[in-house]
Amino acid sequence: MDSMASKPREATGSDLSEQIKAATKDVHVRAENTQLMLNYQKGLITQTQYKLLLCSLYEIYRALEDELDRNAAHPAVQPVYFPQELARLEALERDLEHFFGPHWRTRITVPAATHRYTQRLREIGKSSPGLLVAHAYTRYLGDLSGGQVLGKITQKSLGLSGNSGVSFFLFPGVTSPNRFKQLYRSRMNSIELTEQQRRDVLDEATTAFELNIEVFDDLQKLLSITEEASSEKGNDATSKTLSKTFSSSPALQLALAVGITMATVAMGVYAF
Ligand code: HEM
């Protein structure tokens, strides 16, 4: 377990599932109110934005699921290890192939915040696997909650038919998201933790939400910078420039991606 400093928080019951929900209540509101999520809820998601989000989700779930798989037998992972029901990586691969075609692997573009998130996942997977439950909770229970609404919005906003491009939001192994969430919570509550380990898990859950917020903010900035660039060039649609980023040669993609990152760094966005 990490020995991160514990922060004061309201105690609401002794169950980990209740404590984690209470501990992340405020940061959940912050996540909901990021510009990207607000736009999303208004149905203002474009295909370009969604493709960019899928790229980051792919890197995040690749790291999360690699680490969960590697630590599947760990006593704090085993009770919440549900690869059949929850694993998202293959679904994300299908969605990416749908939008980018067979060579989608060469087209993944992610901002610095996504790298920080995946680095954190890999680091705790190696040094403190007991903290993985905080990350699995944050992503999977989120996907089974607000994520279900976002899936429907995506389908409608992008005019997608059937499941093409939105496999990420679908959980064929979960008949009832609510019942599954109850099961997941009871499994979380069965993990034996010392008080310090419990505090570390609660802190890590807040960190997990913050890492998500940073990814959303970075994606939004990336999109805004591209929008500014395209309007300066007299280009009317935001999506045009990013679509070009995604559809041009790998060398050009890299140059554009690096250019965008450098522009963002120059604005003091990234704090390493
Ligand atoms: C548009 C943005 C979002 C909306 C509208 C939303 C909405 C919701 C709602 C309504 C619930 C409660 C469901 C229930 O009690 O059964 C929920 C739960 C949850 N959400 Fe979100 N959410 C959003 C974004 C996020 C994000 C970005 C994350 C994390 C990355 C997240 C993580 C969670 C988690 C972990 C839960 C389960 C809480 C618990 O029961 O312990 N949500 N969300």
Image (cartoon, rainbow, N blue to C red):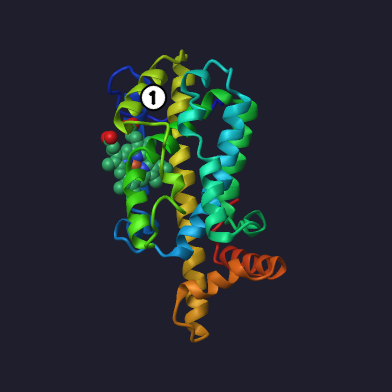
Q: How many marks?
A: 1
**Residue pushed farthest bottom?**
234
x and y percentages locating residue 227 in the rendered image: 47, 74
Looking at the image, residue 261 sits to the left or right of residue 168; the answer is right
The image quadrant where one finds the N terminus is top right
- Callout 1 secondary element: helix
Coordinates of residue 253 in the picture (x, y in percent): 65, 67
Left or right of 196? Residue 255 is right
Hey, what amino acid is under mark 1?
Tyr
Would residue 175 be seen by someone viewing this image from the given angle?
Answer: yes
Mark 1 vs ligand 1: CB under 8 Å? no
Is 256 or 96 nearer to us in this picture? 96
- On the question of residue 204 being in view, the answer is no
Q: Provide the residue designation for mark 1.
A: 184
Q: Give the image location of residue 153, x and y in percent.
A: 33, 55
Residue drawn at (30%, 23%) of the image: 11
**Residue 113 versus residue 245 in the image, above or below:** above
Quadrant for residue 188, please give it.
top left
What residue occupies the far front of the structure in this picture? 162
Residue farthest along the right direction in this orientation: 251
Position of residue 59 relative to residue 229, above or below, is above
Name the residue at 38% across, 31% down.
174
The quarter of the image that holds ligand 1 is: top left
User: At x 39% / y 62%, what residue is drawn?
Assistant: 158
In the rendered image, residue 212, in percent from the top left (x then y), is placed at 46, 46
**Position of residue 228 in the picture relative to residue 8 (left or right):** right
Is 237 placed left or right of 68 in the picture?
left
- Tell me the crowding category of disc 1: few under 14, some 14 to 19, or many 20 or more residues within 10 angstroms, Cα based: many
